[in-house]
């Protein structure tokens, strides 16, 4: 199975959890829309760059009650092509075509982020997409403005959050290497702050001091306070944390991140993913 979070009405991301090689479980928001189509004739088209895979098996998951999934040869080929592993997360854009005789679910892979990749990969994608939107604004027509508005709102949310996959260096009690992506710092004007507050899935606030590094691609890292947050939330290697700037506090002097945790091991009941 995979952890899931809906990003917008047209996007979602999946975190690869044990069992993901057998099926891709679709978010509830997508499943609700699929109720409008003839499931017996539904075909899914999974795209990644210039490559595409046709998936004929769109059916109910055996592991998640009431949710639909993609499985079969097409999904297996997609997994093998990208060499997916547990804790990887993927961002999809989706579109459901219900006007044709044979309804189609189109899934376009926007980002593939491995658990060992640079933490700024996801954010850079969002930033480049945002710049592309501005470069094409003058060419839009009234019929596309609403779609563009949705795209901007999606970009704004994506640029207010970043993800970290837990590594051994994050568990260090002294000088943990918990870095904040430089692009994220620039985008949100955080270069002059000296401390932040992490609010865990239980709503508990954890003050954390920031340390500026003079060497490396990630000049800002979390220092004192992070080890306490790590221990209290029972974080483990492979867990994925989403750090999202709290929109209600963006204009105040306090910088608060709401942290959502996606455990690599779903049986780790001491770690909550929040609401």
Image: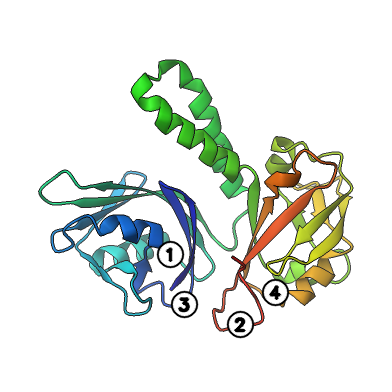
In the picture as drawn, the residue positioned furthest to the left comes out as: 101
- Please give the name of the residue rendered at 14% of the width and 64% of the height, measured from the top-left corner: 40
Which of labels 3 and 1 is toward the front?
3
Label 2 crowd bin: few (<14), some (14–19), many (20+), radius 10 Å: few
Q: CA distance from mark 3 to mark 4?
A: 17 Å
Which of the two discs, 1 and 2, labels the residue nearer the N terminus?
1
Q: Nearer the viewer, residue 223 or 234?
A: 234
Q: Quadrant of residue 251?
A: top right
Residue identifier under label 1:
83
Residue identifier under label 2:
268
Residue 220 in the image: x percent, y percent? 81, 48
Which of labels 3 and 2 is toward the front?
2
- Please give the name of the residue rendered at 50% of the width and 28% of the height, measured from the top-left corner: 132
Q: Indicate left or right for 178 with 90 as reference.
A: right
Which of labels 1 and 2 is toward the front?
2
Residue 246 in the image: x percent, y percent? 70, 49
Which of the two discs, 3 and 1, labels the residue nearer the N terminus?
3
**SS state under label 2:** loop
Residue identifier under label 4:
235
Q: Indicate left or right for 226 with 188 as reference.
A: right
- Residue 259 visible in rendering: yes
Q: Nearer the viewer, residue 9 or 217?
A: 9
Q: CA distance from mark 1 to mark 2?
A: 25 Å
Q: Indicate left or right for 84 with 127 as reference.
A: left
Q: Quadrant of residue 69?
A: bottom left
Residue 18 shows which numbered tag?
Answer: 3
Q: Nearer the viewer, residue 271 or 89?
A: 271
Quadrant of the snapshot with the C terminus: bottom right
């Amino acid at each position: 199975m995979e952890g899931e979070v809906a990003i917008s009405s047209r996007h979602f991301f999946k975190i690869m959890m044990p069992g993901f090689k057998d099926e891709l479980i679709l978010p509830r928001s997508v499943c609700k829309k699929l109720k409008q189509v003839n499931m017996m004739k539904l075909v899914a088209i999974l795209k990644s760059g210039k490559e595409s895979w046709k998936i004929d098996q769109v059916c109910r998951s055996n592991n998640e009650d009431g949710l639909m999934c993609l499985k079969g040869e097409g999904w297996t080929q997609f997994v093998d092509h990208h060499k997916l592993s547990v804790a990887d997360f993927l961002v999809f854009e989706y579109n459901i075509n219900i006007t044709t005789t044979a309804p189609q679910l189109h899934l376009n892979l926007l980002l593939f982020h491995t658990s060992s990749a640079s933490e700024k990969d996801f954010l850079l994608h969002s930033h480049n997409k945002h710049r592309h939107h501005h470069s094409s604004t003058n060419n839009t027509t009234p019929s596309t403005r609403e779609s563009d508005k949705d795209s901007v709102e999606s970009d704004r949310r994506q640029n207010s959050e970043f993800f970290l996959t837990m590594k051994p260096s994050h568990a260090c009690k002294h000088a943990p290497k918990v870095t904040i992506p430089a692009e994220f710092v620039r985008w949100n004007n955080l270069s002059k702050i000296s401390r932040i507050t992490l609010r865990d899935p239980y709503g508990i606030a954890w003050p954390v001091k920031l340390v500026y590094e003079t060497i490396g691609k990630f000049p800002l890292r979390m220092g004192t306070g992070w080890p306490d947050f790590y221990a209290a939330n029972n974080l483990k290697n492979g867990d994925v944390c989403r750090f999202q700037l709290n929109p209600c506090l963006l204009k105040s002097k306090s910088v608060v991140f709401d942290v959502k945790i996606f455990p690599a091991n779903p049986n780790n009941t001491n770690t909550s993913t929040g609401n």
